[in-house]
Amino acid sequence: MKKLILLSLTYVALWAVWYFAYPYFLIWLEGFSFFTTLPDFTAIHFHLPEDTFRYVGSFLLQFYAFPAAGAAIQALLPVLFILSIMAIIKRLVENSEGLVWIAYAFLPLYLYYQMSDMTLVRSITILAAVAAAAMLVYLATIFIKPFGKVPAFLRNRYFCAVMLLLSLGMSVSVMTTYGSVGRHYEKVAHMYHLAQHQEWEEILEEISVQESVQNEYMRKYALLALAQTGQLTDYAFRYGLSSSDDFLFYDVQESFCLSFNVLFYRTLGMNNPAVYHSYQQALQSVPGLSFDAMRNLTDIYLEQKEYELARKYMDILAHTTCHGKWIRERLPKLEAIRDAEPEYRMQGDKFIMESFLPDISSMYDRYPKDAKYADYLLCAVLANKDAGTFFKIFNVVAPRIYTEGQRIPRIYQEALLLIASKEPVVLKVYRIDDDVWKRFTDFTELMSQGKTAQAKRKYADSYWAYVY
């Protein structure tokens, strides 16, 4: 009974850690995996029996879309591992009472491997090996007596309690500190989840300015959220914008990075690069496909009214375990585009997605009245400290977007004030707000007095502090 209570408490504790500390990482694991009952997929990607554990892992990961279910599976695996070791000890040692701490001594090591296991293959393989050993020991000890007794001090209740607490403490440490998943993976997965559901304000609440400045993953999500809420041109430098490359991940084949790129391009309505990065994202998964990529591709093709391609991916997802509701929600959209002509937003000459500035410049040329493209382009040029190019582009953008006395964003006003020192005509053409003038006057006075550090600290979110 005591062992049952201990195991039950262990299960509940492990479930609670996974559910409350890593819920979004569990959801991300489902998106990173893929499983379908289609026979061609099984024949191509799973070679049984050697891929049995990978097959089982892919099946189980489907349920991680629901964090409570994912946490239940994650907690169950180490508990079964402990039970298998306890079974071995019981059959090999005659006086095995009180030796449960030996089984728990292996728990931190198992959790360490489990936390870096994104396919469950390693976790299931270790569990299967220990369970098989327990079965062999059981069969062998039918005919062979246990090997004898262990010293009494190893079964002492106080010694056992200390060893149990030590093992449990190390397990908690592994799950919260030393696991390769860590809080970083959970935070990135959380931001990705919020961005998928367009919770832009919540992203800005979750990411502090300091965190955005120090962490490139958080900075990209913060900048994306600023752009989606219309605040990029006021607070980009406050959140650490320092290069045109801060908006996207380049030359990185990491699933978290590719997932972000898909989101970025979809928010801009640039579906072709979103499709490209979706395929690249899928290739990071073991079978070369992933639920996240499949869902993205389905939604993109529905938006483009590509009936055949959208139906293809919906048919594949229809042969999975947990996508019934998801498919039903999109069936009306699919039927609505059955006879429609595909729509592609990109028009004119094709160009290659290489780097941020050429790409966003080309998109602005195609959609000159779209402020979002203009803001990305202008902020990227300012981030590269190229005031001359900014002024040339702004002179083209302003008559199209900032018409009829519409306020010019603060960052642009700050850049124009710097340019005005060499081009006084700027002040005759563009209106500068009184508060921006006051800030600039105070900043220049501090700088002239040699109080550079104070000036940069006081106006840390300004373009002036960034330039200097």
Image (cartoon, grey):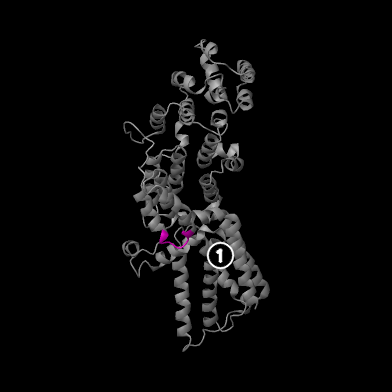
Residue 314 position, x and y percent, is 40, 55
Give left or right: position of 372 versus 274. Answer: right
Give left or right: position of 143 versus 86. Answer: left
Give left or right: position of 312 versus 132. Answer: left
**Residue that label 1 marks:** 72
Picture layout, residue 402 above or below residue 372: above
Q: Nearer the viewer, residue 435 or 98?
A: 435
Picture layout, residue 302 above or below residue 451: below
Give left or right: position of 370 versus 67. Answer: left
Residue 336 position, x and y percent, is 42, 48
Asked whether 18 falls inside the magenta stretch, the response is no
Asked whether 319 falls inside the magenta stretch, the response is yes
Q: Nearer the viewer, residue 284 or 306?
A: 306
Specify whether residue 418 is in view: yes
User: Which quadrant, please, contains the C terminus?
Assistant: top right
Residue 363 position, x and y percent, is 40, 31
Residue type pointed to by label 1: Ala
Picture layout, residue 244 above or below residue 69: above
User: Which quadrant, please, contains the N terminus?
Assistant: bottom right
Q: Which residues are magenta?
A: 318-324
Q: Secondary structure at mark 1?
A: helix
Q: In the image, what residue occupies the spot 63% across and 79% down?
A: 152
Q: Quadrant of residue 79?
A: bottom right
Give the main secondary structure, helix, strand or loop, of the magenta stretch: loop
Picture layout, residue 328 above or below residue 443: below
Q: In the image, what residue occupies the spot 38% across and 58% down?
A: 316
Q: Nearer the viewer, residue 65 or 38?
A: 38
